[in-house]
Amino acid sequence: MKNIEIVCFGEVLWDNLKEGRRLGGAPLNVCYHLNKRGIPSAIVSQVGNDSNGSDILNEIDQLEIDRTFCTVSESKPTSTVEVHIIDEKVTYEIVEDVAWDHIPYTAELENAVGGAEVLLFGSLVTRNSVSRNTLFRLLPAAKYKVFDVNMRPPFYTKDRIEALIKVSNLLKMNEEELFVLCDWWQIEVKEEERKLNTILNQFESLEAIILTKGAEGASYCSRDIYLSAPAQKVQIADTVGSGDAFLASFLASKLQGIPVEEALKSAIVLSGFVATQAGACPPYELAEIY
């Protein structure tokens, strides 16, 4: 784990789509694409001691993802999710009380987080107090904290989302999630830039916000700059995991010292490619995409 630059904390699971099951979980998807971009990354999660769990671990190995901290639960099952895609809109049925709801804390894990450049997490993994407590014990050790809002009804609350934003340095969300936050905090300005700046100014530790907008592209807002970039026109297979690919590419560019504007455009390219493929972790070579 000495060379790990980004630790991705959260769910690993089987997405059950109409064409069959596929490996999923937002943190794992991000981890996969980070490694593809040359950023050594590791997944922190848990599977059950069952055939689904064994299959996930085998898949993770085939994707060459570091699973040093992906443990096996003897009492909780491996996670599965029913994915429904209607008119390009994706909804999820997520089984509760599964292995990744009970990710254990260890001193070794905290040392790994402290040695990495980034700790990445989402809101879904905090639905259960066990994984939530583990995450909050790890947060003080992290140098840079990235929160992918990733709201999955009914597994989030206003208080938990706010608590996670308060400790984050970079916030990533989509337009629906921005609408929810603005409704919670009664942000009534219409201009996107003003909305993002209003949120930034509410949280002292927050340095920047990334807003993904599907076919409209994406925006980046910090206290110094605001940038917006258009999406590419692509033939969509499914959009599962495209936001995760976007975030992975952006973070990779950030760690590689690439300017924000170029990082935003590169992230849109990778996100668009993933949307043309089935599943969140399709095989590819960077040279084919860029």
Image: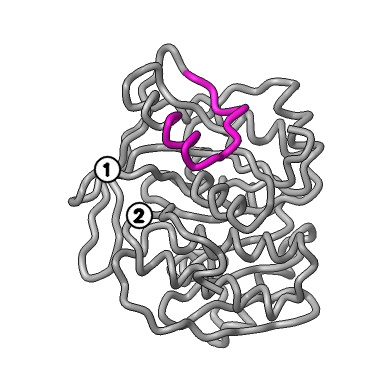
Residue at 81% x, 37% y: name it. 115
Region of the chain picked out in magenta, as a range: 57-72
Coloring scheme used: one colour
How far apart marks 1 and 2 lie (CA) works out to: 9 Å
Q: Quadrant of the C terminus?
A: bottom right
Q: Nearer the viewer, residue 141 or 115?
A: 115
What is the residue that sits farthest to the top in this orientation?
74
Residue at 63% x, 29% y: name it. 134
Query: Viewed as shown, does residue 90 lie left or right of 76?
Result: left
Residue 106 place in picture, x, y as percent: 69, 20
Q: In which quarter of the image is residue 80?
A: top left
Residue 28 place in picture, x, y as percent: 51, 44
State the SS at label 1.
strand
Residue 223 place in picture, x, y as percent: 78, 75
Residue named by callout 1: 21
Query: Viewed as shown, does residue 143 lie left or right of 48?
Result: right
